[in-house]
Image (cartoon, rainbow, N blue to C red):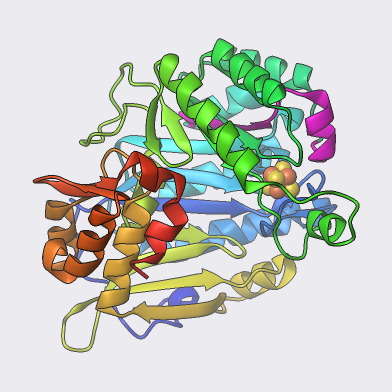
């Protein structure tokens, strides 16, 4: 039976294969205040839209339940935006809908993003009660002046309070997000931020360099000369510092921007990645399947083509919150971009994304399972050239970035797309 949310798709889904991992992403498009560097599809001042948007998210989740029946969900990621701006009733409704509509695989990783300025102990207890087993806190810096520059609503003390409250509520898998490469960022300030982060002992760390995105206040400040642009060489040096400090503290660098601890309990991911690697993000990096619900959310699923062949399709939902919610609630499609991926494009994306996994890289066996072709033949020229330049390493099982390749990753990835 056709269902209205996916009516933009002429193709059915293939028979359910419970062995294939499938992630669920839920986009909460709200924040208390918009940070000047952020280009995510998220808005401040829309409190009046919370209820209707949660209604729409629940409806979209319900609509997708039948087509995805029989597919166990291996990870759920509630992100945004700032999911924790929603109140207890709204969060409860969302999680109740997920559990009612989907089969969550045993050990399913359920992540919720939170802003240290929007959480307290009762909210963390609520998230635990709702089944969230991984928390991702947007800390960004331990330097008050950097937090002010980034326009964050929280201070350093809020981070300590939030982290302690999360641990007290029982979170045993916590990620902390940081941003480095701010204009003229002092190396000593970055080293101090890393030291304070490590002292807390989170299971996972994500470190992203500051990017000046189009159509943001930061872009305007840089273009008008109010703020200097971030410097790539300075950011590279700060990244090297992070590589050293985190390795010395026992964190495993498993993705270009991500580190994790390896101590038990195992998260069930059979790979070279550390125990606390983010399973949901591993789906993206392995070019696997995920359904995204919410305004602007992206999805990637394998569907059945006219000759019975499997085709990869990705799509995104319309971004404006009011029209997303109104259309979902009247049963109309919210897809505003959709494309079928040519086989060669999909293979290139598997390389571009998979090479971000600095330990795992792209395994020949996984590539063959996913595309029915031998990576060593499809990309023979590209791999030979990049190995000769010292940017890729190849062994009997995989290709992956060399240390030199890691420092110029974007140039390596571009060779495949
Ligand atoms: S809190 Fe996060 S999602 Fe919200 S505006 Fe700031 S950076 Fe963007």
Residue pictured at 46% horizontal, 72% vertical: 315
**Residue at position x 59%, y 38% in the image:** 113
Q: Nearer the viewer, residue 253 or 336?
A: 253
Picture quarter containing residue 33?
Answer: top right
> Is residue 146 rendered magenta in the image?
yes
Is 1 situated above or below 132?
A: below
Which of the image's four quarters has the C terminus? bottom left
Q: Residue at x 81, y 49 (%)?
A: 228
Q: Which residues are magenta?
A: 132-152
Residue 173 in view: no
- For the residue pair 227 and 66, the one nearer the viewer reads as 227
Farthest-out residue, front: 389
Q: Which quadrant, please, contains the N terminus?
A: bottom left
Percent from the top left, x then y, of residue 245? 50, 19
- Residue 389: percent from the left, percent from the top? 30, 54
**Residue 14 on image: x %, y %:** 22, 71
| Quarter holding residue 52 | bottom right
Residue extending furthest toward the bottom: 306
Image height of 386 relative to 319, above or below? above
Q: Position of residue 121 (x, y in %)?
A: 67, 18
């Amino acid at each position: 039976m056709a269902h209205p949310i996916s009516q933009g798709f002429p193709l059915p889904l293939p028979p359910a294969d419970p062995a294939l991992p499938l992630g669920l992403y839920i986009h909460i498009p709200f924040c208390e205040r918009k940070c000047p560097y952020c280009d995510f599809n998220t808005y401040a001042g829309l409190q009046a839209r919370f209820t209707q948007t949660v209604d729409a998210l629940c409806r979209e989740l319900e609509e997708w339940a039948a087509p995805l029946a029989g597919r166990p969900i291996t990870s759920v990621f509630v992100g945004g935006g700032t999911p924790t701006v929603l109140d207890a009733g709204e969060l409860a409704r969302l999680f109740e809908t997920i559990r009612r509509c989907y089969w969550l695989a045993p050990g399913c990783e359920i992540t919720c993003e939170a802003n240290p300025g929007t959480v307290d102990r009762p909210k963390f207890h609520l998230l635990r009660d709702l089944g969230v087993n991984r928390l991702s806190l947007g800390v960004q810096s331990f330097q008050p002046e950097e937090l002010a520059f980034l326009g964050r609503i929280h201070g350093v003390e809020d981070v300590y309070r939030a982290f302690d409250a999360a641990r007290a509520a029982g979170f045993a898998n916590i990620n902390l997000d940081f941003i480095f490469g701010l204009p003229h960022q002092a190396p000593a300030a970055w080293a101090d931020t890393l030291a304070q982060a490590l002292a807390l002992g989170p299971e996972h760390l994500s470190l992203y360099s500051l990017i000046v995105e189009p159509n943001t206040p930061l872009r305007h400040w840089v273009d008008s000369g109010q703020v200097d642009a971030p410097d790539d060489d300075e950011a590279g040096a700060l990244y090297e510092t992070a590589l050293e400090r985190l390795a010395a503290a026992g964190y495993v660098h498993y993705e270009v921007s991500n580190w994790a601890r390896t101590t038990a309990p195992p998260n069930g991911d059979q790979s070279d990645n550390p125990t606390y690697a983010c399973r949901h993000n591993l789906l993206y990096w392995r070019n696997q399947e995920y359904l995204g619900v919410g305004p602007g959310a992206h999805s990637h699923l394998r569907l059945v083509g006219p000759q019975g062949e499997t085709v990869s399709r990705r799509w995104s939902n319309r971004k404006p919150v009011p029209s997303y919610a109104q259309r979902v609630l009247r049963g109309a499609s919210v897809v505003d971009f959709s494309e079928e991926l040519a086989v060669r494009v999909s293979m290139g994306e598997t390389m571009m994304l998979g090479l971000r996994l600095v330990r795992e890289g792209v395994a020949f066996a996984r590539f063959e399972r996913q595309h029915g072709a031998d990576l060593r033949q499809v990309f023979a020229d590209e791999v030979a050239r990049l190995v000769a330049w010292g940017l890729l390493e190849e062994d009997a099982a995989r290709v992956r970035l060399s240390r030199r390749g890691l420092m110029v990753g974007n140039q390596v990835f571009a060779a495949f797309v």
